[in-house]
Image: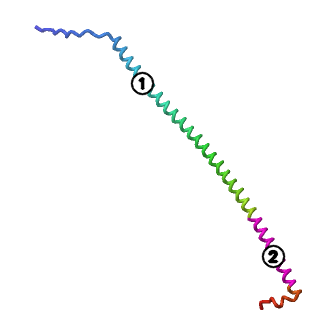
Amino acid sequence: MIRRRRPPTAAPLEPAEPTMAAIRRAEEAAAARLAAETADRADVDAARRQAGEILAAASRRADERAAERRQAVRAALDEQAGRERAACAARAGRLRDAAQDRREAAVRLAVALVLTGEAATCSSR
């Protein structure tokens, strides 16, 4: 006689609804984490861009201020050089006038010595 085996009794199946809900919640949580990470990366990228823009603007302002300062220093040095040139020209003029006055005095003295006849006694020869 052939005996037929009975299939094993299957355990009662769990309802699929709670399992599907748990899977859905896990997927939603993973999507939320991914969205938060993406948002964090976007915030970091935005912050980096903003920091780069701020640094670029600060660099431009520093360059402009340095250029203004260089121009101010050059202008001050040019003004000082102009004052020194004027002072030197005035001194040179006074020296030239003094030399001219001394030359004229020397010529007058020589003429007087020649006219008075004292030139012969003053000769160094």
Side (left or right) of 84 relative to 20: right
Front of the two marks 2 and 1: 2
For label 2, the SS is helix
From the viewer's side, name the closer residue of 94 and 80: 94
Q: Residue 17 at x, y = what percent? A: 35, 11
Q: Residue 49 at x, y = what percent? A: 53, 36
Crowding at dot 1, Cα within 10 Å, few <14 / some 14-19 / many 20+, comes out as few
Look at the picture and state if 79 lies above or below 106.
Answer: above
Was residue 86 drawn as part of the magenta stretch in this picture? Answer: no
Name the residue beneath numbered marker 1. Answer: 33
Which amino acid, by three-letter code, is at mark 2?
Arg
Q: Residue 120 at x, y = what percent? A: 83, 91
Was residue 100 drawn as part of the magenta stretch in this picture? Answer: yes
Side (left or right) of 52 relative to 76: left
Q: How is the image coloured?
A: rainbow
C-alpha separation, residue under disc 2 versus residue under disc 1 = 101 Å
What label sits on residue 102 in the rendered view? 2
Q: Which residues are magenta?
A: 88-112
Q: Residue 74 at x, y = what percent? A: 67, 54
Side (left or right) of 26 relative to 117: left
Could you tell me which quadrant the C terminus lies in? Answer: bottom right
Which residue lies at the image location 69% right of the left edge and 54% below the top edge?
Answer: 76
User: Mark 1 and mark 2 in contact (Cβ < 8 Å)?
Assistant: no
Which residue lies at the image location 40% right of the left edge and 21% below the top edge?
Answer: 29
Which quadrant would residue 21 be assigned to in this image? top left
Which amino acid, by three-letter code, is at mark 1?
Arg
Look at the picture and state if 1 lies above or below 102.
Answer: above
From the viewer's side, name the closer residue of 120 and 34: 120
Which residue lies at the image location 34% right of the left edge and 14% below the top edge?
Answer: 19
First along the sequence among labels 2 and 1: 1
Look at the picture and state if 93 lies above or below 107.
Answer: above
